[in-house]
Amino acid sequence: MLDQLHIRDERSEDADAVHALLKAAFGPDDPAVPPLVDSLRRNNRLSVALVAEAGGVLIAFAAASEAWAQHGEADIAAIAPVAVVPAFQRKGIGTRLMREVLDRCRRAGFEAAVVLGDPAFYSRVGFTPATEAHLHCGWCDGPAFQAIALQPGALERIDGLVEYDPCFDECN
Ligand SMILES: CC(C)(COP(=O)(O)OP(=O)(O)OC[C@H]1O[C@@H](n2cnc3c(N)ncnc32)[C@H](O)[C@@H]1OP(=O)(O)O)[C@@H](O)C(=O)NCCC(=O)NCCS
């Protein structure tokens, strides 16, 4: 499976397929995610948007947008959402896509990244609890909020509340 996977930048003509794959991955419990991505795209707030295709079909998506820490200076990427269509989950695709997104964020100049999600998944690519770096999230302060340094020492230079792009406020 992984050898047939092609990861590339999202193109404008992918928008409908991305919306459909997000709907399939997040299901009825999280209806806010597909419109969130539409809103980030419409407002030009997607710093990184990657799709994974297999056999010409889009099966996964991951995006990053800018975020800001209350104190200190570092360029922070908020990685959200990350989604793999249900039939292709637990085959290593999400992990591979996360590695690529982090690499793209690093190359785009981001010095740190944050995510909200299951630590069992995100710890696989190096995320640790954000509270260890004294970073907090306005929506959730449990173990789901995690951070990673993309440049050495970046997490030591920031602390406090991390603010996501205003597009996220419409969805939380
Ligand atoms: C979370 C998600 C992106 C993971 O992608 P994936 O391709 O299934 O993940 P991988 O195969 O690379 O890694 C799976 C591992 O992550 C961990 N994991 C923890 N929670 C998980 C979850 N809900 N789903 C899948 N894996 C999970 C497990 O360790 C799992 O390993 P295992 O299968 O041996 O138990 C995917 O399941 C998904 O799209 N879920 C719905 C949307 C979502 O919740 N996105 C994340 C929040 S933005």
Image (spheres, rainbow, N blue to C red):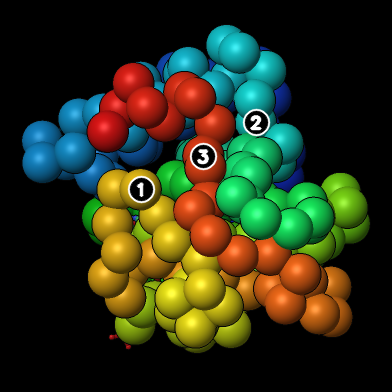
Residue found at x 53% / y 60%: 160
Q: Is residue 87 left or right of residue 131?
A: left
The answer to whether residue 16 is above or below residue 32 is above
Residue 89 in the image, given as x and y percentages of width and height: 33, 65
Q: Residue 33: in sight, yes or no?
A: yes
Single out the mark in the foreground, 2 or 1: 1
- Residue 93 percent coordinates (x, y): 49, 67
Residue at image point 48% right, 17% down = 39
The percent position of residue 60, horizontal first and vertical second, equals: 47, 49
Task: Looking at this view, name the residue that lies furthest to the top.
Answer: 42
Task: Please identify the quadrant where the C terminus is shown.
Answer: top left
Residue at the disc numbered 2: 46
Amino acid carrying mark 2 in the image? Leu
- Would residue 2 be seen by someone viewing this image from the given angle? no
Position in image of residue 38 (x %, y %)? 46, 18
Q: Which mark is residue 116?
A: none
Mark 3: few/some/many CA within 10 Å (<14, 14-19, 20+): many
Dividing the image into four equal quarters, which quarter contains ligand 1?
bottom left
Q: Which residue is mark 1?
A: 138
Asked where in the image residue 13 lies, by quadrant, the reply is top right
**Residue beneath disc 3:** 164
Do callouts 3 and 1 mark residues in contact (Cβ within 8 Å)? Answer: no
Query: What's under tag 1, amino acid-wise?
Result: Gly
Q: Counting residues from the N terminus, which is met first, the one under dot 2 or under dot 3?
A: 2
Mark 2 and mark 1: Cα distance apart in space:
21 Å
Q: Nearer the viewer, residue 62 or 13?
A: 62
Q: CA distance from mark 2 to mark 3?
A: 12 Å
Asked which secondary structure carries label 1, the reply is: loop
Give me the residue at 10% from left, 41% from top: 29
